[in-house]
Image: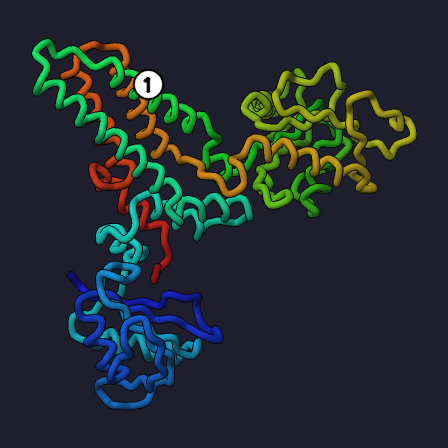
């Protein structure tokens, strides 16, 4: 196993930079630069010197971790040095000149933690999401996963399945008719219901990609002006000519810590203009797929949408001062009603997203849990204990793929490639 090193903090210049070394030669490389290392998990200040010339590089805080009680499960040395570019480059150059050391690949520290059993695949996915989190909701959901929330739940399920498997095998060994124990089928049905409840939860993709909020209505209803007012900048072209917007425009925003994808669409109307007709067709498809529809047309013409907000636009104009019942008065010119609209969007979005700090499944995780639930359902529909034992084996294998213990080699490179260098 190679010994790897990398800058594990932000790019210099900075007040402090952290350089991490992990692998079988980490302690030797640390002593070559810093002299005697402190005891494990103890902080010490050391002079860092170039092993070749003996020249002083910096005075830094040095930490030592011994395998397997480290973040990667290997020997680790960390240098917390001053964060100037020249200092960091000198430390990295000194390490690069050491025999048996190489620069780490993106995500390689975390991958080694996974391979050495320090974290499972669900925790690694949580860490990747945590690094990419841009809103408070994303951060909390990622942290719940990274701290082992799903891992602990899977461990509980695995314990139940092992007990059920043992009961099935015992029946096979000692009962001549190979008829399944009715209590076994009942226990499998109860576990299946629990898995289905988890599958019914809001998924993490909606939290990561944002709640799709589509602004729709007829031409010249004020859709693009409203988009610009909400975004705080000119993102959409605004003219008095109907049909100006030919294609949709997406604006990612965070509303009260909730990610949304605000979309401006072409005005919905019949048109002979071929290009505009394509835009109208796309707009209709976006409205149908939206999580929230902000409708700026006549209230009675609003499309049937679960998250529908009827807006009375251009409310600053005297001839439009009367607001229809059930509609929200908004003026893109004066800004009146825009805050109330955003609050309403945020309220609906929060109902669609996972609860704050709760564990949200991604598509891969949901697929494995669904496979386990299907296998458990098959047990309830059969009286053959041999088939029950085989289906319980399928459940165990699905859980192993869920945690990364089996059958995930094809996706590891893609996952850990999402990490930055030094993580």
Query: Which of 118 and 124 lies nearest the eye of the viewer?
Result: 118
Residue 200 spot, x, y in % from top left? 45, 25
Mark 1 neighbour density, 10 Å: few (under 14) some (14–19) many (20 or more): some
| Relative side of 237 to 332, left or right | left
Residue 248 shows up from this direction: no
Q: Secondary structure at mark 1?
A: helix
What residue did someone put label 1 on? 189
Q: Residue at x 23, y 25 (%)?
A: 164
Q: Please indicate, yes or no, whether residue 129 appears anywhere in the rendered image.
A: yes
Q: Residue at x 22, y 76 (%)?
A: 29
Residue 49 x/y as whole percent? 29, 86
Q: Residue at coordinates 39% horizontally, 80% vertically from top-left?
A: 86
**Vertical arrangement, residue 11 with respect to residue 268, above or below:** below
Give the quarter of the image for residue 63: bottom left
Q: Which quadrant, please, contains the C terminus?
A: bottom left
Specify the quadrant of the image occupied by residue 396.
Answer: top left
């Amino acid at each position: 196993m190679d010994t790897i090193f990398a800058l594990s903090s932000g790019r210099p210049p900075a007040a402090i930079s952290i350089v991490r070394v992990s692998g079988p030669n980490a302690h030797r490389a640390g002593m070559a630069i810093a002299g005697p290392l402190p005891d494990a998990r103890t902080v010490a200040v050391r002079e860092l010197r170039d092993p070749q010339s003996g020249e002083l590089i910096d005075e830094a805080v040095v930490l030592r971790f011994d395998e397997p009680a480290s973040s990667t499960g290997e020997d680790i040395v960390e240098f917390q040095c001053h964060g100037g570019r020249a200092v960091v480059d000198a430390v990295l150059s000194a390490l690069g000149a050491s025999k048996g050391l190489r620069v780490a690949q993106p995500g390689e520290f975390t991958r080694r933690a996974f391979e050495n059993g320090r974290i499972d695949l669900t925790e690694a996915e949580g860490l990747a999401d945590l690094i990419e989190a841009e809103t408070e909701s994303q951060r909390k959901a990622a942290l719940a996963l990274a701290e082992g929330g799903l891992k602990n739940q899977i461990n509980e399920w695995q314990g139940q399945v092992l007990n059920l498997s043992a009961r099935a095998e015992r029946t096979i060994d000692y009962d001549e008719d190979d008829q399944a124990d009715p209590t076994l089928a009942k226990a499998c049905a109860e576990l299946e219901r629990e898995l289905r409840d988890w599958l019914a939860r809001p998924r993490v993709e909606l939290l990561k990609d944002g709640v799709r909020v589509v602004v729709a209505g007829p031409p010249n209803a004020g859709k693009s002006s409203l988009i610009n007012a909400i975004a705080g900048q000119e993102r959409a072209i605004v003219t008095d000519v109907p049909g100006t917007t030919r294609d949709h425009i997406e604006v990612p925003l965070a509303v009260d810590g909730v990610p949304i994808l605000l979309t401006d669409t072409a005005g919905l109307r019949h048109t002979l203009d071929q290009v505009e007709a394509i835009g109208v067709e796309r707009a209709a498809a976006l409205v149908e797929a939206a999580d929230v529809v902000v409708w700026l047309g006549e209230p009675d013409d609003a499309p049937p949408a679960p998250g529908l907000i009827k807006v009375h636009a251009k409310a600053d104009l005297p001839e439009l001062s009367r607001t229809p019942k059930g509609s929200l008065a908004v003026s893109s010119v004066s800004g009146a009603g825009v805050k109330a609209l955003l609050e309403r969007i945020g309220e609906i979005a929060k109902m669609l997203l996972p609860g704050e700090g709760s564990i949200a499944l991604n598509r891969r995780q949901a697929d494995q849990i669904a496979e386990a639930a299907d296998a458990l359902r098959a047990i309830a529909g059969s009286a053959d204990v041999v088939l029950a034992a085989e289906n319980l084996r399928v459940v165990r294998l699905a859980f192993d793929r869920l945690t990364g213990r089996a059958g995930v080699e094809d996706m590891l490179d893609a996952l850990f490639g999402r990490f930055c260098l030094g993580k």
